[in-house]
Image: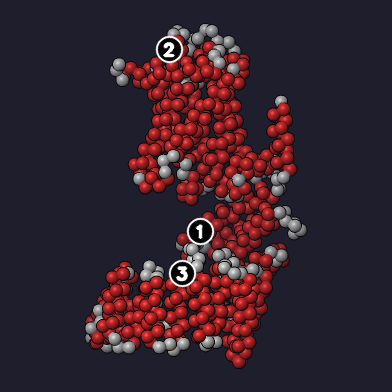
Amino acid sequence: MSPILPLGVALRAWQSSASLLFRSAIWLPFLLMAGIQALALGLLLGFHHDLLLPVGAPLVEMLAGREAMHYPVLYLALPMMFAKVNLGINVLVASLASGVATVLFARAFGSANVGSAWRAAFRSWPVLIVLAALSIALVLGVSYLTSLVPEETRSGSRGVRWGVRALSLLLFVLVQSMLAYTTAWVVLRGQSIWPALRDSVRVAFRTFLPTFIVVGIPALLLYPFSYAVGRVEWIASKFRPEMVSALIGVQLFFELVATFVVVGAITRLFLWRMGAAR
Amino acid sequence: MRAWALLACGLLLAACGVDGHVGARFRAERDLFRANQMYRDASIRPSLVKDADWRELAARYQGLTDRYSASLGATSPTTAEQELQTISAGALFAAARIFGSLQDSTQVLEIFGRLEREFGHMAAVAGEVALARAGIAEGRHDAESAIRYYQTVVDRVEPDPQDAGVAGAVLDLPLRIARLRANGHPEDAKDVYLQARRYYEDKVASHPGTLIQIDARTRLAEIAADLGDWRASTRSLRQVEADLRVQDPPPRDPAVIRYYIAGSMSRGDAPKDSLEQALESVLADYPQSDAAIQARGSLADLALVSGQIDEAIAHLDRLRADRCELVRAGERDLVDHLAVDRRDERVSGRSRRDGPRDAVRAHRIPIWVWCWSKMPHFE
């Protein structure tokens, strides 16, 4: 098979998704997720305000210890704290949002047998939560695997360091690709956890390269942000500690757009594979 | 539903335990951080910063104290409140430092007064103010006031040699007081040093195995040296070195203490052989220490003084081989010096025949012998 073909399929999937960028109804679940992320970030950053202190201070202390309640330590600990909060948001909210978005995309792509997006997603929410938790557990497992490379080996060689980063990103994209179709199987076909997992992997294998490209390219494009966020001490010392929160904000914005495009493209590929698209 | 209720209860309980000053402390730290950043930026080229800008920065520090010290209560403060007090006092100190650099003593003394009034209950702040006032008094040659302020610090602040603030300076002060008093009344020197010695002996006894004990013993050696009792000084230093050698890693370089021992022996008119032995023991036991360079140089000095030029050159050759970068810096210095001399000779039409250059020529000593004379000397 020509390598151009999967790339063409991926491009068509992105194009289909991007053509819906101005449909406000589809943005709603993504905006819900982004709103909650923004609230969480705001709560962490503004914990010192008298109104937020009763909730913000215990939260900051729980996530990063007492030291994080000092300036500028808060900003140094912010990426780690927000990553922890974001795990919870991903499991509880992003799972629902992606379910709603998948139904909305399917409807926009002309899939006839889909009902109310919110109702369908709410009905499948527990299953979506379990699948999101599983996905996060696998991603954390990948991070753990790469952390097994000894620190001395990593710090001793630039090649090893970048090799580990590349391997980590590759494994992340692979895991995400394998699980990419679970939401579609659950909300569009009403499957439960294990069948959804099994069939997602099956579809991912059958559509491997397009799926890998659709998931992998946005992940690659977003990598500079996560790389920069990992260098908070440098950023805080070179510029201002507040730059860290600005960077996380920018990262969230681009992640939001990328998630929109990826969810749309995956739904398009799913419908294409199922032969349900017009 | 039960889970939500539990979460709400948990948050409520956590909220009850929150110290209300945590938020104010964070904001104060942020404002201080920003003011300090402005101070650092201005300090890069202080001459380019107008006096009015410095005063504005000082006002910013003072404003920080005004803003955050208003909410402070003096009775049983929480940790966050204590830290907030420290930040507020620190901001005032920073303002005083700026006014000090502007030579505005009126403002400095006003700030010190405010610090004593508002933060005098904090031992560290009272100590810092007293230390600063003592410095000013010494500058004015007012030894009595300086002694009084130093004594306030000693009475109120527990020494901590690792502290960068006033606690780190406390151990020096009893000796400083004794020296000031002895300068004023040399006839009472023994008595005033006795008081200082008691202080240090007490610290040695009450802080076994700590840096305080080591530093206090070093001061005891200094007291003995001041009183001309070089044997006692050497004995104390030997004890300090023994204390340091059992610690891993030692908080101070034991090689330096060994070098001081040699210094103490030299002042105590020890025979040349034992002095040489002491210096060579620094080289043998601590070859990697910077004190070894000094010991090698002192050996060269000793040889030069005894007229053993070859031995001196041998030591300096070794020094050059071991730490050539230092010697090279000295050589560059000498080359510059000679270039200036030659220019002077051309201008004046005569050659200067004094100074170390002649010693170099007379004994045909390699250039680095003269370089050595530019380095720190063994006394």
Q: Residue at position x 27%, y 75% from top?
A: B317
Q: Amino acid at mark 3?
A: Asp
Chain letter belonging to callout 3: B
Number of the front mark, 1 or 3: 3
x and y percent of residue B60 in the render?
61, 57
Dot 1 and dot 3 residues touching (CB under 8 Å): no
Q: Amino acid at mark 2?
A: Arg
Chain letter belonging to callout 1: B
Q: CA distance from mark 2 to mark 1?
A: 63 Å
Number of the front mark, 2 or 1: 2
User: Image quarter for residue A145?
Assistant: top left
Q: Secondary structure at mark 2?
A: helix
In the figure, B286 relative to A163: above or below?
A: below
Q: Secondary structure at mark 3?
A: loop
Q: Which mark is residue A96?
A: none
Q: Pick whichever of labels 1 and 3 is earlier in the sequence.
A: 1
Circle 3 residue: B253
x and y percent of residue A265 in the render?
45, 19
Closest to the observer, B322 or A225: B322
Q: CA distance from mark 3 to mark 2?
A: 74 Å
Circle 1 residue: B40
The answer to whether marks 1 and 3 sit on the same chain is: yes
Dot 2 and dot 1 residues touching (CB under 8 Å): no
Closest to the observer, B370 or B35: B370
Q: Residue at position x 40%, y 23% from top?
A: A212
Q: Secondary structure at mark 1?
A: helix
User: Image quarter for residue A209?
Assistant: top left
**Which residue is most to the right?**
B75
**Which residue is most to the bottom?**
B187
x and y percent of residue A130 in the render?
57, 23
Could you classify mark 1 by the number of other residues whose Cα lies within 10 Å: few (under 14), some (14-19), or many (20 or more)? few
